[in-house]
Amino acid sequence: MKEATITQITGAGTWEGQHGLLYKFEYTFDDGVTLAALHKTEAPPFKVGDKVNYEIKQSNQYGNMGKVSRLEAQPFKAPEKSKGGSNLQARSFALSYAKDVYIGIYGAKDPAEVAQEITDTAEIFLEFLLID
């Protein structure tokens, strides 16, 4: 798949396929490539200026047909451990992540009620982040 920025989107009709009614859009990218892609939504799922991945599946006298998708998420990379065993960035990340996880599991509560539980969870995340 290639990465590019969308410079133009044009509606190009509909197509009845085995998955029902699909909407065809022609995308032009900043690298000069134009391709048609089918989507289930009446409006294109992308807008001009979006960075996307695209793949040309086939080409013929009518142009390129392919797939346009969101950029693939980059895998999380834990902060590197600093000399001396202390890492402020990792500690900050662990505490923030612990708070989000706790709220996601148990719901929002008064921070004073759950501060120790969040801190304990953050210590577990921090140990994981700083493993050599």
Image (cartoon, rainbow, N blue to C red):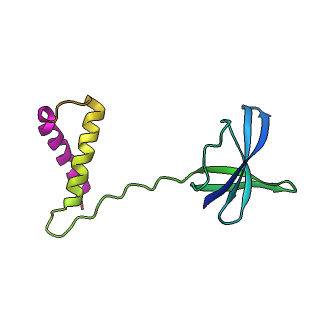
Which residue occupies 19% across, 60% down?
A: 88
Q: Give the range drawn in magenta.
A: 112-129
Residue placed most toward the observer, 114 or 123:
114
63 w.r.t. 19: above or below: below
Q: Is residue 46 magenta?
A: no
Q: Which residue lies furthest to the right in this view?
A: 61
Image quadrant in which you'd find residue 113: top left
Question: Most prominent secondary structure in the magenta stretch?
Answer: helix
Q: Where is residue 25 in the image (x, y as percent from the top left)?
A: 72, 46
Horizontally, residue 64 falls left or right of residue 42, namely right
Q: Does the magenta stretch include residue 115?
A: yes
Please count the marks in the image: 0
Image quadrant in which you'd find residue 117: top left
Q: Where is residue 71 in the image (x, y as percent from the top left)?
A: 54, 54
Image quadrant in which you'd find residue 21: top right
Q: Position of residue 38 (x, y in %)?
A: 71, 43
Q: Position of residue 119 (x, y in %)?
A: 15, 43
Res 1 visible: no
